Amino acid sequence: MSVHKEVKKVTTHQLQEMKRRGEKISMLTAYDYTMAKIIDHAGIDVILVGDSASNVMAGHETTLPITLDQMIYHASSVVRAVDRALVVVDLPFGSYQGNSKEALTSAIKIMKESGGHAVKLEGGREIKDSIERILSAGIPVMGHLGLTPQSIYKFGTYTVRAKEEEEAQRLLEDARILEECGCFALVLEKIPAKLATEVAKSISIPVIGIGAGGGVDGQVLVTHDMLGMTHEFSPRFLRRYLSLYESMTGAFQQYIKDVKSKDFPNEGEQY
Ligand code: KIV
């Protein structure tokens, strides 16, 4: 008799059931095998291989430079680590905005070469055709509205979006369009909590917020931010669960001291 217990994988359908039951959805980013293994083991529902890898892993100022092949490298490392979570992979800037055929080709390449379970695209009505074409190939799509970092040069700042009535109305309409065209869930980034709650109430697919308050169906944070590994970034919505920047610096300094003082390695740490 086998004692191996089969892990029940999170599916897009289950996330929709969670919304129906009122159970909140947890989502975090990961870009590498080791981090993804820990996050999955902790019991997260969704892992996002975000194009924030461009900032967090590569040190770029924006998410624009990361390429499709680089996203595939990150995503395939994450997929190898994950037993349970649903792995969603960002389509990077320039890989889907041209036309729907280009979007489909990029989404297929990500699914084939990374083994991810779904893709995420930023935008509303202007990318509807692309979303529909990707969905027609059987690839689940997560939407992303509000602050959309791939359009940073259009907006000029990372401030809260949709504070004015006209933009709020447009966002609400876009959320409905994304639901109608078949997205399984939606990320809302940095918009007023009241508007995010209204969006979550008016559509049946899960709405996952970052800086969008507690009235939505789930929350996502960038893992390196919530662990306190990054310390120059401190938006109001960010809750830090650890101060790893300080504790890691302390560990590195201790190691340097131990090497210099010949304390490391000791008798028991050699062959
Ligand atoms: O790339 C990313 O990490 C994201 C989240 C902030 C939602 O899109």
Image: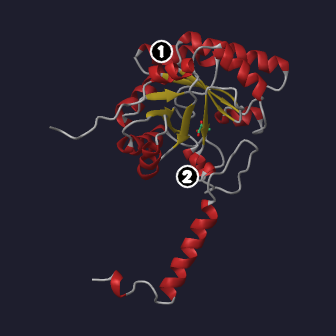
Q: Position of residue 95 (x, y in %)?
A: 52, 30
Which residue matches tag 1? 133
Question: For the residue labelled by badge 2, is the local secondary structure a helix, a strand or a loop?
Answer: loop
Amino acid of disc 2: Ala
- Residue at image point 51% right, 78% down: 255
Residue located at (38% from left, 31% from top) = 9
Note whether 201 is above or below 76 in the view shown: above
Tell me the tag on residue 107: none
Asked if residue 241 shows in the view, the reply is yes
- The way the protein has been coloured in the rendering is secondary structure
Horizontal side of 210 relative to 119 (left or right) equals right
Q: Residue at x 73, y 50 (%)?
A: 234
Decide: is 59 above or below 21. Answer: below
| Ligand 1, image quadrant it occupies | top right
Residue at mark 2: C-beta within 8 A of ligand 1 = no
Mark 1 lies on a secondary structure that is helix
Instruction: Tell which residue pokes out farthest to the top in this image.
Output: 180
Residue placed most toward the observer, 250 or 147: 250
Quarter of the picture holding the C terminus:
bottom left
Q: Mark 1 vs ligand 1: CB under 8 Å?
A: no
The image quarter containing residue 126 is top right
Location of the N terminus by quadrant is: top left
Disc 1 and disc 2: Cα gap in Å?
Answer: 31 Å
Q: Is residue 263 above or below residue 22?
A: below
Q: Indicate the position of residue 81 as horizontal and vertical percent values.
A: 37, 45
Residue at 57% of width from left, 34% of height from top? Answer: 93
Residue 104 % position (x, y): 45, 21
Q: Is residue 17 above or below residue 230?
A: above
The residue identified by callout 2 is 58
